[in-house]
Image (cartoon, rainbow, N blue to C red):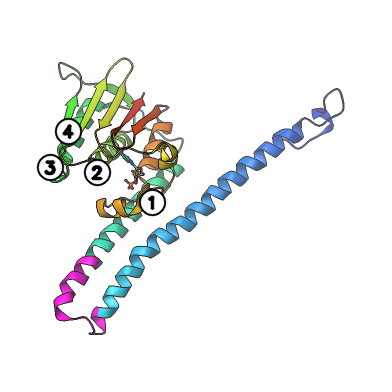
Amino acid sequence: LAVPSSSQKNVDGNAEGAVVLALDITEKEETDGIRREFSANVSHELKTPLTSILGYAEIIKEGIAKPEDVKGFAAKIYSEAKRLIALVEDIMKLSRLDEGACELPGEVVDLQEICQEVIERLKDKAEAAHVTVEFAGSSDGSPIHVTGAYAMLDELVFNLCENAIKYNKTNGKVKVDLTDNPVKLIISDTGIGIDKEYQERIFERFYRVDKSHSKVTGGTGLGLSIVKHIVKQHHAAIQLESELGKGTTIEVRF
Ligand code: ADP
């Protein structure tokens, strides 16, 4: 701890250590602030679908729902409950990532295989959104290796590809490019794009540019903060380029 002491005074007798202490406190206050804001956001995000579920369930329970409305109310309860599960899962993922900050397994992971599997898993979603997904990996199909955690890298590729599909337009395109030496993953879409003023904010927890759109597409607002965390843990770098109405390109460099 940088408590100023006589041994930490400089030639003018000023305590240099005090500056370090001030920085430490600022950093801690910032982290505490982020934590408090996160807890408040978590409570709010969980409360919204729960209130809705409670409201519809009460109307049905009290027998005051018109018979023709009951099915619609049940569907609302179902989709809000699904949203709750997605939220709880994402919150748990983030808290696991926070906890395990230093315990990254040193697995040799084939990103080529992950990209192919993720695209296959998202096939139905892409078809439903009328979006085509194209993959360009190594020319001979040979693996493209990075060291890290398989599950995390899978999550990273999935979240980025899912967003490129979700925030696309009808008949839009998604291109997933993977190169070796250096290992680079570039996901570009011809979607709705992101206004300059929101481009940094979308990596914040729970931040969504258009909350109503995210509700339709089932977003939690946590996907990109999970991505940011995974990138950091893999000592990789992420870069975003986007133009409103034209599309978005996200590059992850390992
Ligand atoms: P969500 O669960 O809402 O998708 P994310 O953290 O993954 O949360 O993304 C945060 C927000 O960033 C989204 O709600 C959306 O507004 C914006 N966004 C993310 N990816 C894209 C993209 N490829 N194109 C346009 N907007 C995007």
Q: Does residue 119 sit above or below 65 in this rendering? A: above
Tell me the magenta residue range: 60-76
Of residues 101 and 170, which is closer to you in this image?
A: 170
Image spot of residue 126 (x, y percent): 16, 41
**Which amino acid lies under the numbered mark 3 shown in the image of this protein?**
Glu
Spatial separation of the CA atoms under disc 4 and disc 3: 9 Å
Image spot of residue 86 (x, y percent): 30, 54
Of pointers 1 and 2, the one earlier in the residue sequence: 1
Q: Which residue is mark 1?
A: 91
Q: Which mark is residue 166?
A: 2
Q: Does residue 45 sit above or below 181 in this rendering? A: below
Q: Main secondary structure of the magenta part?
A: helix
Question: How many other residues sit within 10 Å of disc 4, few (<14), some (14-19) or many (≥20)?
Answer: many
**Which amino acid lies under the numbered mark 1 shown in the image of this protein?**
Ile
Of residues 37 and 194, which is closer to you in this image?
A: 194
Quarter containing the C terminus = top left
Q: In the structure shown, which secondary structural element does the residue marked by tag 3 occupy?
A: helix
The answer, for residue 7, to whether it is visible in the render is: yes
Which residue is painted at 17% across and 42% down in the image? 170
Of pointers 4 and 3, the one earlier in the residue sequence: 3
Spatial separation of the CA atoms under disc 3 and disc 1: 28 Å
Which residue is painted at 25% across and 23% down in the image? 178
In magenta segment, residue 233: no
Q: Which residue is mark 4?
A: 133
Q: Which residue is mark 3?
A: 127
Residue 15 picture quarter? top right
Of pointers 2 and 4, the one earlier in the residue sequence: 4
Residue 120 picture quarter? top left
Spatial separation of the CA atoms under disc 2 and disc 4: 12 Å
Q: In the structure shown, which secondary structural element does the residue marked by tag 4 occupy?
A: strand
Q: Are marks 3 and 1 in contact (CB under 8 Å)?
A: no
